[in-house]
Amino acid sequence: MARRNWATIFLNQLAETSNVKAAAEAANVSQSLVYKRRRDDPDFARQWYDALAEGYDNLEMELLGRLREGRLEETDADGTKRKFDIGTAFRCLIAHRETVNREKGRRTLEDEVATMKSINAKIDAIRAREETAAALDAKRQQKRTPRDG
């Protein structure tokens, strides 16, 4: 059963892990539910991409830190050594860069369309005010002009 705040938990975990499966498990929901929500809810989809971008930014910073420090493996609390997979990290970052660029392009287009709609609405409002003012001026002029007859 899905928790009421599962979306927040999912998005936070996605930002932390960049892993949809792990984030869905942490939120105690199925992957199919989160993908359906992303398809059906544009706001959730935007938050999803923001969380992924944050997660990959974190991965990039971790990767840079590890490379600079020469820290390519870690030892867990139980003494198990784990090697950091630099090649996979780079492949993830490259794949992510394409997704981010695509999303930025889509958002830029949406922003441009919204800006144009806003500008057009303002122009229409100005024209309507000018037409109203012109009509009022014409009525005033008719009242001032003596009628022949």
Image: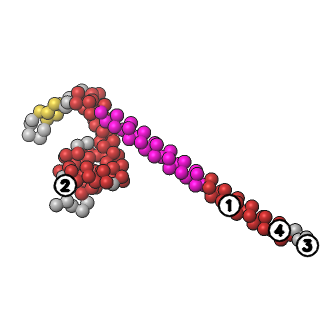
Q: Quadrant of residue 107?
A: top left
Residue 32: percent from the left, percent from the top?
Answer: 21, 50
Q: Nearer the viewer, mark 3 or mark 2?
A: 3
Dot 1 or dot 2, earlier in sequence = 2
Name the amino acid, label 2: Val
**Contact check, label 2 and label 4, Cβ < 8 Å:** no
**Contact check, label 1 and label 3, Cβ < 8 Å:** no
What segment carries the magenta color?
95-122
Q: Nearer the viewer, mark 4 or mark 1?
A: 4
Q: Would you say residue 137 is visible in this rendering?
A: yes
- Secondary structure beneath disc 4? helix
Dot 3 or dot 2, earlier in sequence = 2
Residues at marks 2 and 4, CA–CA distance in whole angstroms: 73 Å
Dot 4 or dot 1, earlier in sequence = 1
The residue tagged 3 is 149
Name the amino acid, label 3: Gly
Q: Nearer the viewer, mark 2 or mark 4?
A: 4
The residue tagged 2 is 29
Judge by depth and name the residue closer to the eye, 99 or 8: 99
Mark 4 residue crowding within 10 angstroms, few (<14) / some (14–19) / many (20+): few
Dot 4 or dot 3, earlier in sequence = 4
Residue 141: percent from the left, percent from the top?
Answer: 83, 66
Mark seen at residue 129: 1
